Image (tube, rainbow, N blue to C red):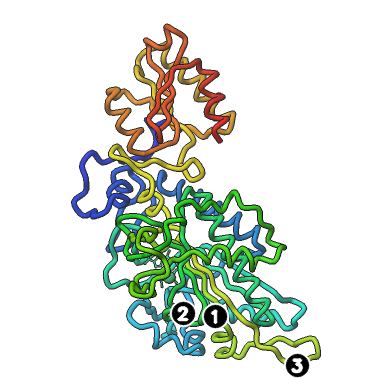
Amino acid sequence: MRLSTYFLPLLRENPAEAQIVSHRLMLRAGMIRQSSAGIYSWLPLGLRVLRNIETIVRAEQDAAGAQELLMPTVQPAELWRESGRYDDYGEEMLRIRDRHERDMLYGPTNEELITDIFRQNIKSYRDLPKNLYHIQWKFRDEVRPRFGVMRGREFLMKDAYSFDLDLAAARKTYNKMFLAYLRTFARMGLKTVPMRAHTGPIGGDLSHEFIVLADTGESQVYCDKAWLESDVLSTEVDYDDDLEPFFRQWTSLYAATDEKHDAANCPVPPDRLLSARGIEVGQVFFLGNKYTKAMNVSVAGPNGEPVVPEMGCYGIGVSRLVGAIIEASHDDAGIVWPASVAPFGAGLINLRAGDAACTEACEALYTTLNKAGVDTLYDDRAESAGAKFAAMDLIGLPWQIVVGPRGLQKGVVEVKDRKTGQREEMTAEAALNRIKAAR
Ligand SMILES: Nc1ncnc2c1ncn2[C@@H]1O[C@H](COP(=O)(O)OP(=O)(O)O)[C@@H](O)[C@H]1O
Ligand SMILES: [Mg+2]
């Protein structure tokens, strides 16, 4: 992509309405624009990150055995009357009436809808287990939408719903999702700590919140410092294994949100206890038969007897993650994207856009980088070097390649690693290899 034609409205000043760094940087880097309180448009750069996050979420859900479908955003009220939540859900639900005076709503979550799909189509124990997910926009009329995409009213969520024949099978599914969640967040460069959680209006009695430690988090959390050394991606596990030992190991270290932490009876000695702020990026719930019972769902069991399936539900805040990753990875100059979610693999800076040799070298590099699968943002604008460096640092691509007349005379370009700030001169070919090798 050439920056001269790309829609990337960068802001030089900090927007007054943004209180936390991720919100400020998302506005400044031209990723989002607010349309009304807690509702945002995703501009091209922001959308790229959102899509990259979706791709990781999708891959890990699929690997764990969940199957993707897509349910609508607008739902009929009847289903929510069946579960009893139409009245319970309260002011957070956006209620709509259609031209036939039918009560509809913009889905804040999808337990009812998926349970209805399940009961209409699955009749036998032989078709279990099933774990179905979608990545879809939700609307919750939050009292205080704030912090940009972190607490929006309209937001993108991955929500999965599982159906199992009995408790033991439901427990296995819960463990698979638990592992998938740890892997998903780790692949985005995030350290998340699973914490026992209250189940809230969703119901059920076993739940974990996945918390990213960050100073601007909305929750106060406590955990064993040993969490900081944990690394799930280096742990070899297979979804077909018995995951109970894994689950035990990953819940053995102390971790609790404010609501669950009891300072007087905390098992961790003070020197090992980390008190921090946290951002909830996902939550898994074991639901039991709350919805299947309320909505009269049963399948024929092995002896023909009706069995009420056990459910679980599993949410990931896909749009919140964009903000959470920035909270966890930025510096004074701007965003520092982990390579796995970066909007482009590299930025190419032409220091002298009017110079024939610079332009020729840049065009050649731009072509080879893209051909090699390194999606590249090429700053071909006639701006000052300072403005180009600042823009590149702000948008935080993992690598910058700087092409200038002085370097070209020596046959080199400069490669900058955005994360470490380290700069090194090398040939264009070496630059390409360096970036390819780092992926
Ligand atoms: N208002 C919101 N804005 C952005 N993301 C949200 C919002 N509410 C929830 N999420 C994300 O969706 C995930 C699943 O939602 P859920 O746990 O049902 O919501 P809550 O924690 O608000 O009860 C949360 O872990 C969070 O990452
Ligand atoms: Mg939650």
| In the rendered image, the vertical position of residue 160 relative to residue 75, given as above or below | above
- Check the image and name the residue furthest to the bottom: 305
**What distance separates the C-alpha of mark 2 from that of mark 3?**
28 Å
Cβ–Cβ below 8 Å for labels 2 and 1?
A: yes
**What distance separates the C-alpha of mark 1 from that of mark 3?**
22 Å
Residue 353 or 101: which is nearer the viewer? 353
Disc 2 marks a residue whose amino acid type is Ile
Horizontal side of 127 relative to 423 (left or right) equals right
Disc 1 marks a residue whose amino acid type is Leu
Location of residue 279 by image quarter = bottom left
Q: Of the residues under marks 1 and 3, which one precedes in the sequence?
A: 1
- Crowd band around label 1 with a 10 angstrom C-alpha radius: few (<14), some (14–19), many (20+): many
Mark 2 highlights which residue?
202
Residue 319 location (% of width, % of height): 42, 57
Mark 1 highlights which residue?
287
Mark 3 highlights which residue?
305
Disc 3 marks a residue whose amino acid type is Glu
Residue 3 location (% of width, % of height): 39, 32
Q: Of the residues under marks 2 and 3, which one precedes in the sequence?
A: 2
